[in-house]
Amino acid sequence: MSGDQRPKDCAEGSSRSGSDHYQPQPAPLSRYESQKRRDWNTFGQYLKNQRPPVSLSQSNCNHVLDFLRYLDQFGKTKVHLHGCVFFGQPNPPAPCTCPLRQAWGSLDALIGRLRAAYEEHGGSAETNPFGNGAIRVYLREVKECQAKARGIPYKKKTKKKTQIRARNEAKPPMQSA
């Protein structure tokens, strides 16, 4: 045999047995699904690191609130304190020593993903700690606090029905040929 021709052994050869069927790869997870899985694993790891460790089935809204407070240390949003000269200014002209926190919108999205993940992992909607009223109150307080600190009032955006109706009436009707 020449140097480039050698018999194929089991490790490198192709096996053509009857069990060789095309097995489709699972579709890649969407960005949302990937983030939801990461968030769920992070929360589970957080519970395991508690002293004593807490199982997911034993977790409650207090664990969720502690988790949200724990995440603040990794935040990137400057939240000015009441004594800061930049408190209430949307665009401060200079840096300050106020802490970085998790942005309200990030926490709100996180809770939504964890709430969905909890139910996907067999939890019931009635016992879901992520849907507890205390979590909603906490998120509302974070939202208001951050809005005041940055001088930006949060106002719910609503579409005015009169504007939509006026636009529709202003359009000429389509004529058929």
Image (tube, rainbow, N blue to C red):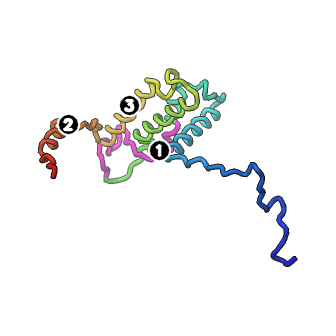
Task: Please tell me the numbered disc located at residue 160.
Answer: 2
Task: Please tell me the numbered disc located at residue 143.
Answer: none
Q: Position of residue 11 (x, y in %)?
A: 81, 59
Q: Amino acid at mark 3?
A: Glu
Q: Residue at 61% of width from left, 24% of height from top?
A: 58
Q: In terms of sequence position, does the residue under pointer 3 or pointer 1 come before the other?
A: 1
Q: Position of residue 32 (x, y in %)?
A: 49, 44
Residue identified by numbered label 1: 75
The secondary structure that most of the magenta stretch takes on is loop
Cα separation, mark 2 vs mark 1, equals 35 Å
The image quadrant where one finds the N terminus is bottom right
For the residue pair 110 and 1, the one nearer the viewer reads as 1
Q: Amino acid at mark 1?
A: Gly
Q: Is residue 52 above or below residue 167?
A: above
Badge 3 marks a residue whose secondary structure is helix
Cα separation, mark 3 vs mark 1, equals 17 Å
Q: Residue furthest top?
A: 126
Q: In terms of sequence position, does the residue under pointer 2 or pointer 3 come before the other?
A: 3
Cα separation, mark 2 vs mark 3, equals 28 Å
Q: Which residues are magenta?
A: 70-92
Q: Is residue 81 above or below residue 125?
A: below
Q: Label 2: few (<14), some or many (≥20) within 10 Å? A: few
Apparent side of residue 36 relative to residue 167 in the rendered image (left or right): right
Q: Label 3: few (<14), some or many (≥20) within 10 Å? A: few
Apparent side of residue 108 relative to residue 29 in the rendered image (left or right): left
Badge 2 marks a residue whose secondary structure is loop
Q: Residue at 43% of width from left, 41% of height from top?
A: 106
Residue 82 among magenta residues: yes
Q: Which image quadrant for residue 104?
A: top left
